[in-house]
Image (cartoon, grey):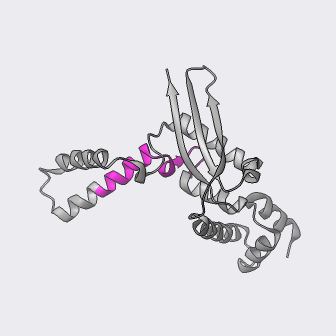
Amino acid sequence: MDLKQVKELRDLTGASVMDCRNALEEAKGNFEKAQEILKKKGLAIADKKGARETKAGLIEAYIHANGKMGVLVDLRCETDFVAQNPLFKELAHDLALQIAAMAPLYVSPEEIPEDVVKKEKEAYLAELKDSNKPEKIINQIVEGKLQKWYEEVCLLKQPFIKDQDEIVENVVKSYIAKIGENIKVYRFVRFEI
């Protein structure tokens, strides 16, 4: 076991030394595979913590250099101790930048009012009305278009600006795994002149 690899994996993932060592052993020394093992383990941990209450947190502010756009993000965690953690603050800042750059309208699909989703579905159905496709196929197409729309308007479903291969929701889950507490994007607001 190469201790240098364990340290590098720990620095990269934030996982414990023991978890890094076990992941490298399981991956038979393959660094990339060990990263994937730790990522899956971290997402499982994040899912378990998802139901825990988030009473603490912080408000992150970002004002663009030209002074014509700004963002406030209300990011919650379980304790004040974690709210002061540099990793938590880093996530809050990255989320503020994400909102500034991508201008989402909602935190998640569950937050979108039903009437807005209904109007969007109706618009997609109207587009496909004369397509002569079976109803089942039309419903699948509409569902696909809705998922694509969620990626545009929902913060947690957007590709992360710092890593387009990840969605924001998974980035938040990776921080939950690193920090060890539940984290929720409670709300945000974006102002632009």
- In the figure, 91 relative to 2: above or below? above
Residue 69 seen in the current view? yes
- In the figure, 1 relative to 72: above or below? below
Q: Residue at x 70, y 45 (%)?
A: 90
Residue 167 seen in the current view? no
Q: Nearer the viewer, residue 71 or 174?
A: 71
Q: Is residue 193 rendered to the left or right of residue 49?
A: left
Residue 53 rendering spot, x and y as whole percentages: 60, 59
Residue 9 rendering spot, x and y as whole percentages: 77, 64
Q: Residue at x 51, y 27 (%)?
A: 191
Q: Is residue 65 magenta?
A: no
* Magenta range: 143-167
Residue 118 rendering spot, x and y as whole percentages: 26, 49
Q: Is residue 115 rendered to the left or right of residue 106?
A: left
Q: Is residue 161 magenta?
A: yes
Q: Residue at x 67, y 56 (%)?
A: 78
- In the figure, 11 relative to 86: above or below? below
Q: Nearer the viewer, residue 77 or 168?
A: 77
Q: Residue at x 84, y 64 (%)?
A: 7
Residue 89 rendering spot, x and y as whole percentages: 71, 45
Q: Nearer the viewer, residue 10 or 46?
A: 46
Say which quadrant the N terminus sits in. Answer: bottom right
- In the figure, 27 relative to 68: above or below? below
